[in-house]
């Protein structure tokens, strides 16, 4: 699934974006003159919350010619997630400053002045997000290197001292409430977005609520930590992408999400090896019972995301055909939940 599955921006749209960007960037790059935007084009993406564009910007500043390659992430009006830009952008600032592999955040336009929709901008990062790596022979060294690199990224993320960094833009949770807060949030979303009763999902929420674990620590959590949301090249992982679900929570949430059957890193590296690398790099232990709970929560969370996508299509908030039949995903996801909890 790529941007080819969405309405293709025409030349007039690209020209409008370019003109809007050139005007708006004069308000963001203090003292810059003669700002020129070139090579503006959409980037293929499977994400549903942001529509990415890449471009080059050149300008004169203090008598010197300067420039950079940037990415514009435009908020999609409707889709599978209910998100806002400000926490994501603020989190990127903190994480990039603390050495977590992310794109450097540049500017944010929450009012959509530049292109008509809210968006923010990061510096371009080299690498590919191609899923073809999973199709290579099992002894391909890059497969293993990328999976180990993801364990290192998770360790770097989960050991950021977010309290000292002044992370006051995300809801605060405790070790006792970290998992419960996520359960409450996604159950509320389910109750608002469902189009039928879905008693099996009601049961799943009850099962999880009866067994809520206490987190070993509270950390910054990506929320969609998986293969497909990274950039990588021959050197390994170059950046973690798609931070729209970032929050404070239990780090095991990210590890469990990375091992959902649909995109599991088990295709590249065994869970035991991944956890051993993560534990070595982070110093954080992984409780098997809590890890299992988070794997079950992941099935429920992805089901609710799919229901939200279907509701957005039904209500006309999106015309992206990928979302039209997303409610059909509830059955296989819940079947997996029931088999794993029997």
Image (spheres, rainbow, N blue to C red):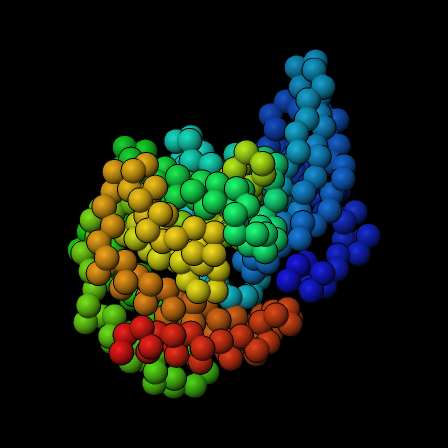
- Residue 5's quadrant in the figure? bottom right
Tell me which residue sits at (19%, 68%) in the image: 211
- Residue 194's quadrant in the figure? bottom left
Tell me which residue sits at (47%, 36%) in the image: 101
Left-right relation of 209 to 199:
left
Q: Which part of the image, by quadrant, shows the N terminus?
A: bottom right
Left-right relation of 272 to 36:
left
Residue 111 x/y as whole percent: 56, 49
Using the image, determine if residue 53 lies above or below residue 341: above
Residue at far front of view: 139
Q: Is residue 253 or residue 135 the one in the foreground?
A: 135
- Looking at the rendered structure, the number of numbered marks drawn on it comes to 0
Using the image, determine if residue 107 lies above or below residue 118: above
Residue at far top of view: 63
Using the image, determine if residue 82 lies above or below residue 230: below
Left-right relation of 142 to 95:
right
Left-right relation of 221 to 173:
right
Q: Is residue 141 or residue 26 the one in the foreground?
A: 141
Residue 244 x/y as whole percent: 47, 52
Work out whether residue 213 can be spotted: yes
Q: Which part of the image, by quadrant, shows the C terminus?
A: bottom left
Q: Is residue 205 or residue 30 the one in the foreground?
A: 205
Using the image, determine if residue 83 lies above or below residue 220: below
Tell me which residue sits at (33%, 55%) in the image: 253
Residue 216 x/y as whole percent: 20, 49
Work out whether residue 244 can be spotted: no
- Residue 305's quadrant in the figure? bottom left
Tell me which residue sits at (43%, 86%) in the image: 196
């Amino acid at each position: 699934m790529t941007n080819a599955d969405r309405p293709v921006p025409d030349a007039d749209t690209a020209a409008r974006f370019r003109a809007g960007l050139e005007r708006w960037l004069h308000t963001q790059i203090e003292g810059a003159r003669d700002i020129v935007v070139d090579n503006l084009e959409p980037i293929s993406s499977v994400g549903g919350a942001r529509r990415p564009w890449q471009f080059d910007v050149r300008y004169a500043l203090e008598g010197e010619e300067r420039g950079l390659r940037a990415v514009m992430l435009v908020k999609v009006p409707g889709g599978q997630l209910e998100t806002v830009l400000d926490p994501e952008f603020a989190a990127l600032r903190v994480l990039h400053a603390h050495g977590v592999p992310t794109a450097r955040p540049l500017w944010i336009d929450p009012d959509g002045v530049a292109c008509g929709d809210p968006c923010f901008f990061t510096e371009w990062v080299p690498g590919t997000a191609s899923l073809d790596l999973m199709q290579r022979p099992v002894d391909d060294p890059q497969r293993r290197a990328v999976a180990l690199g993801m364990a290192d990224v998770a360790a770097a993320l989960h050991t950021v001292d977010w309290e000292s960094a002044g992370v006051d833009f995300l809801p605060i949770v405790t070790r006792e409430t970290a998992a419960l807060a996520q359960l409450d949030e996604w159950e509320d979303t389910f109750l608002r977005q469902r189009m039928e009763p879905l008693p099996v999902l009601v049961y799943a929420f009850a099962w999880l609520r009866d067994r809520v674990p206490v987190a070993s620590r509270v950390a910054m959590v990506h929320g969609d930590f998986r293969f497909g949301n990274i950039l990588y090249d021959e050197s390994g992982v170059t950046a973690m992408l798609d931070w729209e679900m970032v929050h404070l929570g239990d780090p095991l949430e990210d590890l469990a999400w990375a091992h959902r059957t649909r995109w599991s890193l088990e295709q590249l590296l065994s869970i035991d090896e991944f956890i051993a690398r993560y534990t070595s790099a982070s110093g954080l232990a992984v409780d098997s019972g809590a890890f299992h709970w988070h794997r079950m929560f992941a099935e429920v969370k992805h089901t609710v995301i799919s229901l939200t996508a279907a509701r957005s299509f039904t209500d006309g908030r999106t015309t992206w055909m990928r979302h039209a039949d997303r409610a059909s995903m509830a059955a296989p996801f819940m079947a997996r939940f029931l088999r794993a909890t029997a």
